[in-house]
Structure formats: structure tokens, C-alpha cells
Image (cartoon, rainbow, N blue to C red):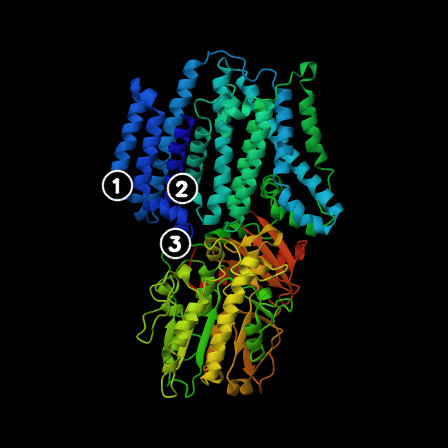
Amino acid sequence: MTISRAIAAAFWLVTAIYALLASIPFASEQFLKPGLSPALVAFARWHAWLSLAALGAAAAGLLPLLRSGHRGVQAFVAAWAAATAAIFVTSPLARLEPSASALTIALLSLVPPVWLSSMDVRAGNDRRPQTDDAGADSTWSDFAACMVAALVVTIWHAVRPAAAVLPLGAGSLAIESTRSLWIHLILFSAMFAAISVVRGAARLMSTRAAVEAWMARAVIASALAIFIFAVLLRPLSMIGIPAMVAAAAFGAAIAMTIGPRGTTARPGLEEALGGVVPSWAARSDVSTGRWLILAGAAIYVLEVRAAAQDWNFALVKTAALASWFLALAATLRVFRIRGGSLAMMPFALCLAVFGCAWVVPDRPMDLAALDAWTSHDPSRRLAGDTLTPRVPVADPGLGDFLQSNTNIARRERVEPVAIDLADLSGPPAGRRPHIFLFVVDSLRRDYVSPYNRGVTFTPAIDRFARDSTVFERAFTRYGATGLSVPAIWVGGLVLHKQYVTPFAPMNTLAKLLDHEQYRQWIGMDNILDVILPPSPSREPIDAGIQVADYRFCRTLDEVRGRLDRLTPDAPPAFVYSLPQDIHVSAITREGAGPIDNGSYGAFYPPYASRVRRLDACFGAFVDDLKARGLFDESIVILTADHGDSLGEQGRMGHAYTIYPEIVQVPLIVHLPARLQAAFVADTSAPAFTTDITPTLYRLLGREPKPPAPFFGRPLFRDRSTPAAPRSTAPDVIASSYGTVYGALLDDARRLYIFDAIALRDYAYEIDGTGAGRADTVREDDRMRGHRAIRATVEAIAQLYHYRW
């Protein structure tokens, strides 16, 4: 019966989660529609049949009650059957669009599991005496359970961080493991205090067990609601009243469903957590130990698998929260200690734990070890976020200001503005080079040999670099593709909205191509479908292929098949592609393993092996251009929309963060010989992907005049023109998908990051390595960073006439 209830609850909770994601414009556009989670897509596609199967499983488990004529169960099954029939007719899940209707469906989907759990609770209360001694003399038991749970959780989450810290020295390992245990002891001491309040309040009532259970559910629901709102919904840009309602509803529903009927847990608090631990695990201490081992292994596997494609650590933090509940529920069922006259001692010990927290130094002895441990330990990260005061904000209103200017909702209409980088009147340039712009999604600078001599698997890119200009310190303006690609086409920072439409008035690169009469061979992905205006000169490449399946080798083969058309009397070609070979989702779908048997040393083999493959294809393409005499008539640009985290301090992916390994990108530009003779570049100066479009303007004889300081500048200058002095103003970067902003300080030698969701900030030295070097945030970093971020976001809003 418990299994059937679990199936029923799981089906409706997943339905609610899907509908909630569909109700959020950002999540719908960036997760569901592109199919980044194939499991969710399949769930929506087969929703009706899954509903029928789950109904059958639930009805089988409820069969004894159905036969006895239980009216509540009969009504429940009948209502579910009616809902299934409606799902077969309308298929609402697969049709959901961001709207209040989607949120309504999400909330309604929470009713069935709550309904079923309510019947279970009522049935349990009917069987229980109305007076009981639940919670009597449980102080020592609760304290022991909480302390052991703290130890268990610390051990569960210590494997990966210990392996990361050990190379830094045994002393660092001892310090950080002790610090981790201490943080968890503080956390679970706080839980002990909350448990004591619940039990103490329940003792004042005649129906102690029922009151205690309901108070416990209320506390759990509140904690879950806060977690859902802060950790899950805010990074998805769902804020305000709708987010509060959704968080409260999901928190209450989950709190109800984790205590199903049939549990052997004692009445009261243990009953409220009864469904977290199976009944067989409480039969003996040995059974509980086995359960804790199994649960720890499951948590470990879940965190490892989730880390490869997580969103702001949401999945691993959810796993960490689950581990807290698992450990606490298991230990509470085991410990029964009689404290006698020493009943107040646990409270004294609890206060001692809190008091000693003031003695432990806040500043770590080894910042690298601290970063390594917390990055690999989501439980400690979550505990730290819970217990640590928020970062002091130099600009008190900055967080709310950024939140209102980030992921601007689709329903908020923003009219496009006309952006022109240069005067495009008159005829096209007399001699126009072909342009090949390859933006390899997620390509890191330190995984190509021109930037890292330790790389041995990109010989073709290395040869290409010798014939080209390598910009040594290049950055993207946006972490993740959603805004990075539009910013390249605009030539500057854009309003944080996906997207202002029609986008054509802002698309300065498209205007240049149209005026210069380029034939356009472009991979039309879901972003370019929005930001590019229709053009009779455009002939798509990779037509009919899903964006997630864009592969560089196949794309280059298609382009090579068209090169015969590039005769001297034909219009020049502009080629653009955003290959997905090394995107984290592509690697995950392909098994997250290397595609060859090469040796990659300290590099991440699944990623490096795919870089090797695309390098070989790129080399063959460049050789073909040379053989046809086209290479010296072409501008060839190899860059990336952003980098990627590949395990640095436990980080994977790029969805939400702007760490150094994500914002640093390769930028290699080959010019025809005649342009090389006319132009020169300062390759040691900071460069940005938003500089590409202004550079093309200048190279085609159209001198750009950026309309605002946050637009790009040409990478090359006329050899007769002296170099302009470098700007001392910080350059602002941002996440494409969340309220996370950064400022490159001190001539881009230092990166300050402000996470306006978690209210945390970080500082890194940009030292030429992929991940930089973590450093302590100085007050000067904070002041300059906050000032630059606000000024830039305000300037962008002013340009787009956006009022928040």
C-alpha cells in the first residue's frame, strides 16, 4: 500500500513541477521547449498514459478500502479517473505556455497527494487514543539524534570534498573536515531547538501526538517553502506573490506527503517524518545502519549525476536538504534515552555549540581549501547559506534593483530601439572578404593550445593561430548562450530580456551584412530565429537539424560543399555557426564519457576528446580554404559564446554562474594579407566577444561610433593611428539567466562577482589559468563593483527606455 501511495504522490508532484516550470517564461523557453531535460519532455508527451498507469497502481493499493465502501477513497479514485479522461482529450501538459493557467494547473496537481495523505492522517488519528505521552522525556533522545544526524550528514558529504582538499595537504584536510562537522553540529543544534519548541508546545495540549505532528508538519512546510522560494524559484526569476504562493503550496504538499499511513513511526514528530524512512529500517539498529549506508550512497550518486547539468546548484542543494531529513528521521526513530535529573543538560550543550561558533575564526587559513571543500559539499554550501549572514552591500538597494532589471518577463512590453554603429549609406565596399564566424558553444580558452601550451589535442587550431591574431585576454559579456549570442550580433550589452521584439532594429551585424550584400549561410537556431530579420540572401545551414544536434564536423562539411559557389564575381559569403559538440547537455546525452581512447592528463576527457574531434574538422576546413585560394580572401574568427566549469571546485556547467572559466573565452581572428598590412591590434588588452561586430564594421570601411560605453570597440586599428589609452573603468559582465553580475577590475586582472539572489559575492584574480585564483573580497572590490554594475544596468535601461 505504501508503494502505491508513493507512485500516486510522485506522479502528481512531477505533474505539478512540470506545470510550474511551464508557467515561468524563462524556464519554459530555456528548459522545456529546447528539451534540455528529455525525461520531462517524455513525461509531458506520455502524460495521459502515465496517469492511467499511476491510477491503476494507486487503485490496486487502495483496493481493500474500495471494497469496504470507503467514500473518501471512492471519490478520490473517481476524481482521478475523470482527470485522466480529460488529459486524454486535451493533453494539457504538452500545450502549456507561460500563463496563470499553467500555475493554476500546477497548484491543482498538488491536490491529489494532499487529499490522499489527509485520508491517511485521519485514519491514523481514528486509531490513536486521544491522550498519549508523545514526546515525554525525549530531550536527551532528540539531542543525541540531532548530533548523530550531524555526524552522518558530514560523513555522507565528505567523500568528494576530502578528495579535492587532500592534494592541498593533510593539515588543510583536517581543518576543513573539522570545520564541516562543526557547521553541521550548529545546524542540527538549531534543529534540536526547533524540535524542543514543538514538543514543549504539544505537551500543553491534551492530544499531544496529533498537535505535535501537525506542528511538525507546519514547521517542515515553512522550511520547504523558504527553500523552494529562495533556492529554486528565485534563480528561475519567479518572484513576488506568485512565487510565494507556489512555494507555500509546494512546501505544504510535500510536508503532507512525507508521512504516509502504514508507517511504524511513533506518534507525533516521528509520524510527520514517517514516510522518509521505510518501516524495515527502524526494526533494529542494524537495519537503521544499513538504511543510512544505502541512503548515503544514493545521495552521493544523485549529487555526482546532478552536478554535470545543474542550475545554480539547485539539484545538489535539494539532495543536501533531503539528506538532512533522511538522517534526522532515521536517528529520531532509533534513540530513546532517559535523561532523568539531567534533562536540561542537552540545552546547555546546545548553547555551548552555538557559543563556540563565535570562537572559531571566520577567516580561513587556506582559502583554496575552503573553496575546494564548499564547492564539492552541497550540504555545507546550503548550511553556510542558511547560517551565514548575507554579504554587506555597499549599495543597499542594488539587489532589488538588479532583480527588477533581470529576466524581464515576456508580458512586459519593451519597444525596440534603433541602434546604428555607423552610417551605412552609399554602395557596398569595393572589395569585401568572406567572413567565417564560428562561435563554438562552451569552448574554454585553456583547452586550446594557443592559450595553454599544456594542450596537445588542438594542433589544427594551433596552426590556425600562427596565421592569425590571438587576443590573449578575451571575455564574453554574458555567461550562457541566451544573451551572449544576441550581444555579439548587437555589438554591445543588451536589455536583460529574452527578447525585445522585433529584434531587427538592434541587430547591427545583420544591418551590415544586408548593406554589404553578403550571402548568408547561417545555422538558424532558436535564438537566431528571433533576433535575425528575414533576408532573401540567407540560405540556412544545418536545416532540419535540432539545435542540440548541431555538430561542427557536419556543419563544416556542408559549408565545404558550397565553397565552389564563391567565385570572384559572386557576392561574398558570411558563414555563422554555433556548434554544440562540447555543450554540457550534449556530453551528458552522449553518456558523459570520452569519445576516444586518448590520454588527456589533468584535462576533463569527455570534453577534451570532443575538442580534439572538432579541431581535426576545423583543420580540414582551413586546409580546404587554403587549397581553393580562399583563406587569404577571408576573415576567419574562432571564438566561443562562453566557457564552462568542468569540475573546478566541484562546479559543472555554465547555466547561472560567471566564474573565470566561464567568462574567459578564446578569440582568434585571421585577416586577409591586405588587411593585415593595414591594421594592427593590441593583443594584450582586454577584448570581448561584443567587439567582433564593431571590428567587422571597421574592416569593411564603416567606422563604428558606439552609442554607449557598454558597446564593443574594434579590435584592430589603422597602423597609422596611435593606440588609444586603455580605459580604467570596470567592464560589467552578467549571467544570461540569473541575477548574477560581475565587474572586471584593474584592467581585467581581477573579477568581482555579485550574486544578487543568494546575496553573496566573490573575487578572483585573473591569472591566465582557466579558473583563476579565488581571493578574499576587499571592500574596494565591493564598492567599485557595485558602482559599475548599477551604472551599467541603468544605462542599458535608459537606452531601451525601460522603466522598472
Residue 434 in the image: state x and y as whole percent.
43, 80
From the viewer's side, name the closer residue of 531 and 170.
170
Please tell me whether residue 208 is drawn above or below residue 147 in the rendered image: above
Q: Tag on residue 88?
A: 1
Please tell me whether residue 618 is drawn above or below residue 71 in the rendered image: below
What residue appears at the point 29 percent right and 44 percent down from the top-left corner?
A: 92
What residue appears at the point 44 percent right and 26 percent down from the top-left corner?
A: 260
Tag 3's secondary structure?
helix
Q: CA gap, disc 3 to disc 1? A: 25 Å
Please tell me whether residue 268 is drawn above or below residue 255 in the rendered image: above
N-term mark: 3 or 1: 3
N-term mark: 3 or 2: 2
Q: Name the residue under label 2.
A: 17
Q: CA gap, disc 2 to disc 1? A: 20 Å
From the viewer's side, name the closer residue of 13 and 306.
306
Q: Which quarter of the picture shows residue 100?
A: top left
Q: Mark 3 points at which residue?
A: 29
**Residue 705 seen in the figure:** no
Please tell me whether residue 631 is drawn above or below residue 798 in the rendered image: below
Answer whether labels 3 and 2 touch (C-beta < 8 Å).
Answer: no
For label 2, the crowd category at 10 Å Cα-Cα, with few meaning under 14, some 14 to 19 and many 20 or more, is: some
Q: CA gap, disc 3 to disc 2? A: 15 Å
Q: Say which amino acid is labelled 2.
A: Ile
Tag 1's secondary structure?
helix
What residue appears at the point 43 percent right and 42 percent down from the top-left corner?
A: 243
